[in-house]
Image (tube, grey):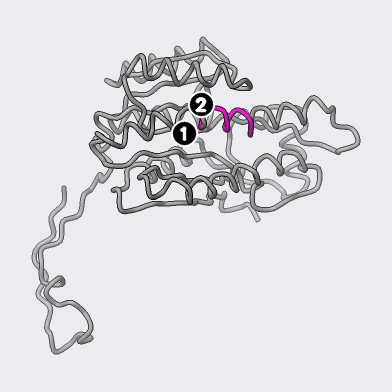
Amino acid sequence: MLVLPTVNVSRAKIDPLVDTEACTKQFTIRSNPVSESLNNTVALVTGASSGIGQATAMRLAASGARVVVTGRNAQRLRDVADKITAAGGDAFPIEVDLRTAEEAERVVAHTIERFGRLDTLVNAAGVMLNGPSIDSPLKDWDTMVDVNLRGLMYVTKAALPHLSEAVKDSPRKVVDVVNISSVAGRVAAAQVAIYNATKFAVTAATEAWRQEFTRQSIRFSVIEPGATATGLWDAKGQWEGFTAMFGEVERLHAEDIAEAVSFIVTNPRRVAVNEIVVRPTDQP
């Protein structure tokens, strides 16, 4: 930690409304304010086999959380868990398809069985299959609704009783749900209708849950990233469609969003960061 020397303030040269008592006290600045702040907590991260979910799982583990990483690619999940373990953390991989309530309940149950509690839920699983509405297969629309919205709903529903229980003996006196939405949950665009719909729904649901649970010390937050260099763009035509509308953009890194998640969940109980929008500098 960096400790600054006492600052002497002349009362004659400052606004009389300023608290000079506070101004003359020694200020302490933590050079790494999130270090070890998640010790003795457990985080469940969906979509953790790659992209934002993977980066978030590794970031939370670095801050001291024990982490359950979930996704549909078993080998990549094991690789993520191995990286966390090799770095001195504790991670448990669970292969799962969260498009059914039963699978969501299974993941949460395994989390409690493994670690005994749940303090942080990060819903990072998502898929983007945009294109002209007339040509888009209906199954692509169904997939986006199932993964982006239903899966998030199912996991959140299954997790809430355990989050509520964890508050009672939480070392931080607060628990968190962070939902990864998108700037597409704020601004609609042509050929993005159903992806827009799912992300608008995530943003709205997060705010409604926030109002419902904030007095119970369950914080709900939403992060709305702009274009981020992840596998979300791998489907045919996704990046080409984006650049046709906005031009070339230096995309965010998954780690940029992971830092935003970390900022939210490592704040003290009195601070609730409800919404963060993170765009690339180049993105209009």
- Provide the residue span drawn in magenta: 149-156
Residue furthest top in the image: 75
Q: What residue type is labelled 1?
A: Val
- Find residue 74 and name its label: none
Say which element carries label 2. loop
Rendering quarter of residue 244 = top right
- Residue at 35% x, 45% y is 217
Q: What residue type is labelled 2?
A: Thr
- Tell which of 158 and 231 is nearer to you: 158
Q: Within the magenta stretch, is there residue 223? A: no
Question: How far across and how far down the image is residue 209, in percent?
Answer: 51, 45
Crowding near the residue tagged with mark 1, few <14, some 14–19, many ≥20 C-alpha atoms within 10 Å: many
- Residue at 18% x, 77% y is 19
- Tell which of 103 and 80 is nearer to you: 103
Q: Which residue is labeled 1 in the image?
A: 122
The residues tagged by marks 1 and 2 sit, at their Cα atoms, a distance apart of 6 Å
Question: How far across and how far down the image is residue 57, in percent?
Answer: 42, 28
Q: Which residue is labeled 2 in the image?
A: 46
Rendering quarter of residue 55 = top left
- The secondary structure that most of the magenta stretch takes on is helix
- Residue at 25% x, 38% y is 37
Q: In this view, does 158 lie to the left or right of 284?
A: left
- Residue at 56% x, 46% y is 224
Question: How far across and how far down the image is residue 232, in percent?
Answer: 64, 31
Q: Do the residues labelled 1 and 2 touch (CB within 8 Å)?
A: yes
Say which element carries label 1. strand
